[in-house]
Image (spheres, coloured by chain):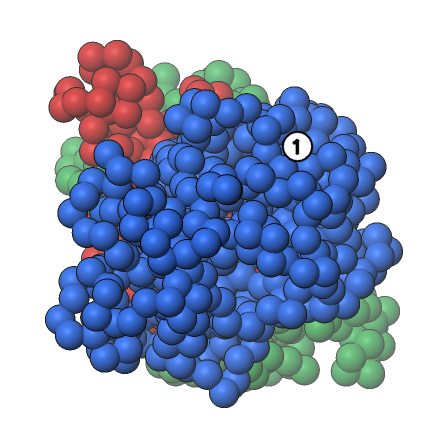
Chain colours: A red, B green, C blue
Amino acid sequence: MERSSARLWRKIRARYNLVGNECQSCKSEYFPPRPICKKCGKKTEMAVKKFAGNGEVYSFTKIRVPPDTFREEAPYYVGVIKLEEGPMVEGHILDDGREIKIGTKVRAAFRRMYVEGDEGLIHYQFKFEPI
Amino acid sequence: MAGIVGYGVHFPIYRIRVEEIAKVWNEDAEAIKNGLNIKEKTVPGRDEDAATIAVEAARRAVRHAGINAKEIGAVYVGSESHPYAVKPTAATVIEAIDAGNNVMAADLEFACKAGTAGVQMAMGLVDSNMVKYGMAIGSDTSQGRPGDALEYTASAGGAAFIIGKEKGKVIADILKTVSYTTDTPDFWRREGASFPSHGGRFTGEPAYFKHITNATKLLLEETGMKPADFTYAIFHQPNGKFPVNVSKQLGFTEKQIEHGLLTPIIGNTYSGASLLGLAATLDVAKAGDRILVTSFGSGAGSDSFAIEVTDSIEAARGRTTKVKDLIGRNKVYIDYATYLKNRDTIKMK
Amino acid sequence: MRDVAIVGVGLTKFGERWEAGLKELMSEAWLSAMEDANISRDDVDMLFAGTMASGRFTGQEHVAALIADQLGFSNVPAVRVENACASGGTALRQGYITVASGIHDIVVVGGVEKMTDVTSAEASTALGGAGDQEWELFQGITFPGLYAMMAKRHMHDFGTTEEQMAAVSVKNHENATKNPYAQFRKKMTISDIMESKMVADPLKLLDCSPLSDGAAALVLAPLEIARKLNDTPIKILASTHATDTLRLAERETLTGVKAARIAGEAAFRHAKLTPKDINVAEVHDCFTIAEIMAMEDLGFYKKGEAAKAIAAGETALNSKLSVITSGGLKGCGHPVGATGVKQAVEITWQLRGEAKDRQVTKADIGLTHNVGGSGSTAVVHIFGRTN
């Protein structure tokens, strides 16, 4: 599926650098960023919050039957990562041949996420790398 | 005087051995290993390209320098494998290192010396007070045509150097840089072509050796230094043999080049090669050590640098992993079929 | 609020229905429900149609007006309901609210999905729309992948095993052999499941529900009218619905579906019943781990105890509690929009005593549990006999 270039461009800060947000009223932190604070449930001041990218594997799986867009990458690990700041985020876990386990420490790396054929855009993003 | 305030490197975890490639083409692996002085090379993962390598190296450089990325005023990315023909790798880098938007940025191409060309540009901007820090990156996922001799060496990797002049921040002063450039058709890739072409043995004497020798001699002449005045030297390393030979011809010893000679174990990282060699050398250098670096880019030209390490190098050490340690860890050896898949060489449609 | 009852049910055979398109499937189910209720088109006040992704699967949107058109209705209001895999259950609840409120009397609620007119890769991508596009599907995380991560954590926290998950599949395939509407009517063994192809560790192909075509429909009426139409109206004792975050990672827990727990608790409260009162249940077994979590979320078992109990046969047909007598999403098939409605069709047959080979001996109170996405929507219904 080809995506509009604007669709991913508008998320570049979040996708490159794990930039989420933080409610200035209750200090709840979010990644990906939320339009309003889920905890407060009303409009509060939301400030930019950059997450360091360190965390650990909370759960994971190895995708062996991928969506069409990831056909050539399969099999690959994905996981729910608990960031050290608290939020949980889903993402790829790089496979360096070592066993991935619940609790494996990871950090955010910078990789190609998806390439739109031979002539389309290349979408870059964080992936998690076992430390 | 402009100098180096920090550096970072990156290369993929995947490796392919000379034997694995030679087997496919019915070649004598031992002869190739001896002839090119190379054992194995890095191969990018399917999700890596010159931009991802540049970003990873740049992020390490920022950590190593201990500076705020927002203080970087210029970013130049040298590569002969920029992911796009039109759309700058440098723009991806500034966003990914969070350098802010008021940054001079451009992609460079001068075959294997685009990275050192970036260093020279950053030096000019720093010395003229146009920027506080400038970043130069050499990053490549170079391609060798299947079956070509280049296939044994063309690898992937990159290095990023942050240039500045603040006392206490500069870990190595760049005393002098000179260049030597001619129009020499030793190696080229036309727009849209997947693989480069080269002039075979013509890439040696009239190209690599001539340019490196001329640039290095000019540098020695202008600084009034002799090979013995340098603790270390790094010469561009398209294979493991050329830099050994050229260093001998110029009067340098094997001991001077051993720390910076990485091609035998990672292959030729093109734009990254000379800078990776410099990074590995700085990892072991001490205050007062002098380092000579001469890059080479086909087409053709060489940039030569005289560098002197300062006391500040000790403070920066340990902020990032050493180059040799990075090379040694988490290696994943792949077979030729996986190599073709990773390099997108299998025809799918 | 008026009491609401089901007075007619209709179901198509589930599976690869190469000969039938969206229109044919819908017409077959809606018409048989109306026949079963003994009503004509002139009696119907409103239609609801649940479908998750008819547009992605067939290009056809606007399916509620389409079914009204196909059945020759004259200008009745018709509304499409979409809540991912809980579209059918949600359509039932919208129909229930409409009748209970007194706005309309006779409402036909259906669900449909025609999934085999696209390649399975396209179908998976369409189903991926139930999760967060940007932060799940774009990350290469498939639906089996999301449930696999729930399973992995369930195994980690409670010692649940792959064999126990396989036992869920074995039970549902066993029940499906007794259901003429089922997509698969073949017995499976634990080793069949364990040896099937790994899809997303630890989930194997036979832990996953298939791509299916099918439709299901129900006729709803106020209880006082229902008694005149039908000898065996089935009363809706509770109809509840809850939501949670679209992204799996943001949930309070990965080892259960909080929305299902909330909807389940509310349903028992409304019906003034407890899990012990349920005789037969159709829960959302899109993956084997989903049934295990459902049994815990709904309070049939304590957290971490359902897998062992299912593997021990406690929820087999005519055991302590008969769960998924239809064969479920796993054995009977999972045309997503139809599933939530089909669950109610099965419970109606059970409570009427019309489930033939798979009839539960004592079937007075039944429950359905329909989940959308990886747990972002949950709809629970409790049904009871009226005689």
Provide the secondary structure element on which disc 1 rests.
helix
Question: In this orientation, which residue lies closer to the viewer: B6 or B335?
Answer: B335
Question: In this orientation, which residue lies closer to the viewer: B209 or B236?
Answer: B236
The tally of labels here is 1
Q: Position of residue C33 (x, y in %)?
A: 41, 66
- Residue at (18% x, 43% y) in the render: C102
- Residue at (33% x, 22% y) in the render: A29
On the image, numbered disc 1 is attached to which residue?
C154
Q: Is residue B165 above or below residue B202?
A: above
Q: Position of residue C171 (x, y in %)?
A: 75, 51
Q: Is residue B25 visible?
A: yes
Which quarter of the rendering shows the N terminus of chain B?
A: top left
- Residue at (52% x, 18% y) in the render: B314
- Residue at (58% x, 39% y) in the render: C364
Q: Is residue B313 visible?
A: no
Q: Residues within 10 Å of mark 1 (few under 14, many from 20)?
A: many
Q: Position of residue B267 (x, y in %)?
A: 64, 59
Which chain does the residue under circle 1 lie in? C
Left/right placement of residue B248 relative to residue C25 reads: right
Q: Which amino acid lies under the numbered mark 1 shown in the image of this protein?
A: His
Q: Position of residue C63 (x, y in %)?
A: 27, 70
Residue reaching furthest to the top: A26
Q: Quadrant of residue C58?
A: bottom left
Left/right placement of residue A51 relative to residue C13 reads: left
